[in-house]
Amino acid sequence: MITLRQLRYFEALARTQHFGMAADQCAVTQPALSMQIKELERELGIELVERRGNSVVLTLAGQEIAARAETILGQVRELSELARQHQGVLSGPMRLGIIPSVAPYLLPAILTEVQQHYQALDLQIRETQTDTLVDELSRGALDVILIALPTQNTQLEAMPLFDDRFLVAVQAQAADQWASKDLLEWIGQERLLLLEEGHCLRDQALHYCQIANRQARQSLGAASLTTIMQMVAAGHGITLLPELCAEAEVDRQRVALIPFPSDPPKRSLGLVWRKSSGRKKDFAALADLIRSVRQAQAA
C-alpha cells in the first residue's frame, strides 16, 4: 500500500533531485529515504528515478507521479488546516514567509505579540525575496506570506494590511538645496542607490518615480538597506526609503528624509495565501495582529 510517508519523501526527492538534501529536509537518514523510494517504486511497478550517485533524474513516469504526489500532499495539509480551525485561531504551527524589506522592521514586534497573546501558535519564519516566497507558498512549503501587493497568481488570495509611503533619503548637509527643487525631476538627475536585482523594493522605486535613465539602471545594487543608507550618509547618492524602515535605518544627524509634496508614492503590504487553504480565520486574525503592531509603531 502506498503511504503518505513515501509520497512526502518522493516529493522532496523530486524537488531537490538529491538524496542527501531530500533526506535532510525530511529529517531522516539517506538510507531510510532511499528505502522508502524503492518501496514506492515496487508498489507502483515502475521506475521513478534514474540514480546517479546522490543525485537523481526523474523518469517520465516519475515526473507525472511527482505532480500527483504534490497535489495529494496539498490536500492532506488542507484537511489538517481545516481541523485546526476548530481548535481556535492562531494555534499550532504556521509557516510565515516575509520579504527582507519588511522583516527586520515588523517581525520583532509581531513575535512579541504572539508570545504575549497567542502562546499556542508556533510561528515559523522564512525571510527571502518575493518570487521565492510565492513559489514556496504555491507548492505548500509555506502557509502564508507577507509581501507587497498585488500578486498575479490567480490561485492565491490576498488581504491588504497597510500602505507604506516612500520618502526621499538624502545626505543631511544637502537637504536645503532640495527644498526649492521639483522632487521627481531632481531624483532623475541624481545617482539612485537601490537594492540589487530581485528585490521588489527596487522595482517599486523605479516604477513609482518613472526612472528609466541609464544613471539609475547603472546605480549601486546593494544587498541591504543598511548599506544603502550608509552610502547616502556619505554623500554617494540618494534613495527612496519606505517609511516602515526609516526609524531603524536613518541616522538623523547624517541623513535627511524629504516627503513628496503631494500624492506620495507608496507600496501596499498584505498577507497572501492559497485560495484552497482552510486557515482563513487564522490569516484574518494574523492580519489584525499585524495592523495593530503597525499602528502602535506609527503612533
Image (cartoon, rainbow, N blue to C red):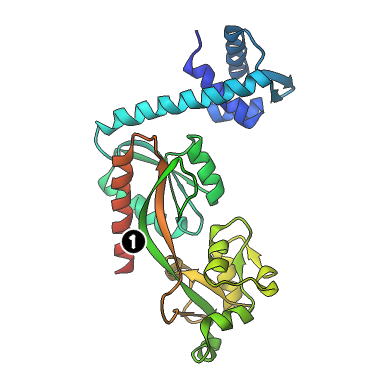
- Please tell me how crowded label 1 is: few (under 14), some (14-19), or many (20+) other residues with Cα within 10 Å: some
Q: Is residue 185 left or right of residue 117?
A: right
Q: Nearer the viewer, residue 27 or 89?
A: 89
For the point 61% across and 26% down, which residue is it? 13
x, y percent for residue 33: 59, 19
Count numbered badges in the picture. Answer: 1
Q: Is residue 75 left or right of residue 136?
A: left
Residue 210, placed above or below residue 8: below
Whether residue 29 is visible here, answered yes or no, is: no
Q: Is residue 174 left or right of residue 96?
A: right
Q: In which quadrant of the rendered image does the C terminus lie?
A: bottom left
Which image quadrant for residue 62? top right
Residue furthest front as drawn: 154
Q: Nearer the viewer, residue 209 or 220?
A: 209
Residue 236, placed above or below residue 75: below
x, y percent for residue 206: 57, 68
Q: Which residue is mark 1?
A: 294
Q: Nearer the viewer, residue 158 or 296?
A: 158
Whether residue 160 is visible here, answered yes or no, is: yes
Which image quadrant for residue 17? top right
Residue 282, placed above or below residue 252: above
For the point 61% across and 78% down, which residue is it? 188
Q: Amino acid at mark 1?
A: Arg
For the point 67% across and 68% down, which residue is it? 217
Residue 103, placed above or below residue 202: above
Q: Secondary structure at mark 1?
A: helix
x, y percent for residue 224: 57, 62
